[in-house]
Every structure is written in structure tokens, then in C-alpha cells.
Image: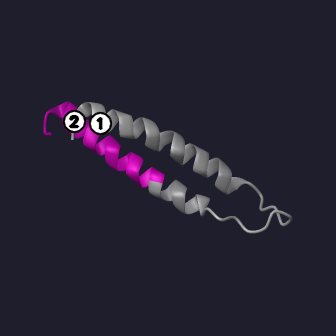
Amino acid sequence: MSLTLTLILLAVAVPLTAFAGWRGAQAPNVVKGPRMVPWRFVMLVGAALSFMLLIHLARVAAGAG
């Protein structure tokens, strides 16, 4: 994977993780009903993806490709 693609994916994954963390921390609204998106799970997946992309970015920057 190229450096450009890694940076683009990282620029998408980090805000997604932050947004999902914010949405997952909101108190449930009983009037609206149950949440249809599992925001805490989305946050966990986004954080794992961000971590893997950071490791890949470090390997690409070091020349280990």
C-alpha cells in the first residue's frame, strides 16, 4: 500500500473513531427508541484500524514497506 493511500485512510479512520466515540457516549433517548448503529463497536473497529495504519505508516516511513 502506498504512503498516499495510507495517509488518506488514516485521515478517514481517526475522525470516524472520534465521532463514533462521541456518539457512543451520548445518553440513550427512550423517546426515539433503540440505537440502530452500535457506536461503541464502530469506535473499537476504527481505533484498531487507526492503530494498524499507524504501524504501517511507520514501516513505510522506515523503508520496510
Q: Which mark is residue 2?
A: 2
In this picture, is 4 found above or below 53?
above
- Specify few, some or many for label 2: CA neighbours under 10 Å numbering under 14, 14-19, or 20 or more: few
Q: Is residue 61 left or right of residue 44?
A: left
Task: Indicate yes or no whether the magenta region holds residue 61.
Answer: yes
* Residues marked 2 and 1 touching at CB (< 8 Å): yes
- Outermost residue toward the left? 64
Q: Residue at x 26, y 43 (%)?
A: 56
For the stretch drawn in magenta, what is the main secondary structure? helix
Secondary structure state at the residue bearing disc 1: helix
Secondary structure state at the residue bearing disc 2: loop
Q: Is residue 40 left or right of residue 14?
A: right
Question: What separation in Å lies between label 2 and label 1 (alpha carbons)?
Answer: 5 Å
Residue that numbered label 1 is attached to: 5
Q: Residue at x 73, y 54 (%)?
A: 26
Write down the quadrant of residue 60 in the picture. top left
Q: Is residue 27 left or right of residue 5?
A: right
In x, y percent, where is residue 46?
46, 51
Residue stretch in magenta: 46-65
Frontmost residue, 38 versus 22: 38
Q: Amino acid at mark 2?
A: Ser
Q: Amino acid at mark 1?
A: Leu
Image quadrant holding the N terminus, namely top left
